[in-house]
Amino acid sequence: MCFNLGDFHEPAEVGIGLIGFGIFFTFLGIVLFFDRGLLALGNIFSLAGVAILLGWRSTLTLFTDRANYKGSASFLLGLFFIFVRWPIVGIILEIYGCVFLFSGFWSSIKVFLYHIPVVGWIIQFISPP
């Protein structure tokens, strides 16, 4: 099978892939007793994926919007704590920041998760649409 670079005709596919790698490396970093390197790599992949998925200007607007200052500050402070070797505090702050920053996207995320075969079935079983 030959890989053709022209297959990636939408940057959204690359953005979702980077976010997936970010989630995977973050999960792996947590499982391996809060490994600082894997957590930092997961954060870099996730931020790059969000920037490619939303676009650079929309990502900057998301992080600098006055309503999102609390989420942006806690996410960036959590990233700082991961880099200065306090990964547990950093992850807690990042989770809080992500929930606060992306609270407007939950309905879109839920619709996206419904289309994933196994995950969609579990979500529909737990909470019907």
Image: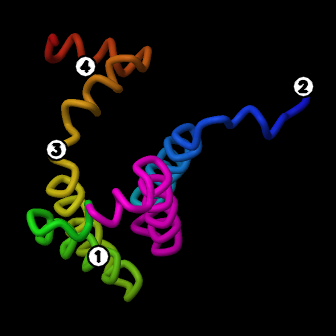
Q: Closer to the N terminus: mark 4 or mark 2?
A: 2
Disc 4 marks which amino acid? Ile
Cα separation, mark 1 vs mark 4, equals 31 Å
Question: What numbered label is drawn on residue 118?
Answer: none
Cα separation, mark 2 vs mark 1, equals 42 Å
Residue, disc 1? 76
Cα separation, mark 3 vs mark 2, equals 41 Å
- The residue that appears at 90% across and 25% down in the rendered structure is 1
Do callouts 3 and 2 mark residues in contact (Cβ within 8 Å)? no
Do callouts 2 and 1 mark residues in contact (Cβ within 8 Å)? no
- The residue that appears at 41% across and 65% down in the rendered structure is 33
- Say if the magenta span includes residue 39: yes
SS label for mark 3 = helix
Give the quarter of the figure containing the C terminus: top left
Q: Closer to the N terminus: mark 3 or mark 4?
A: 3
Mark 3 residue crowding within 10 angstroms, few (<14) / some (14–19) / many (20+): few
Q: Closer to the N terminus: mark 3 or mark 1?
A: 1
Residue, disc 4? 123
- Label 3 vs label 1, nearer the camera: 3
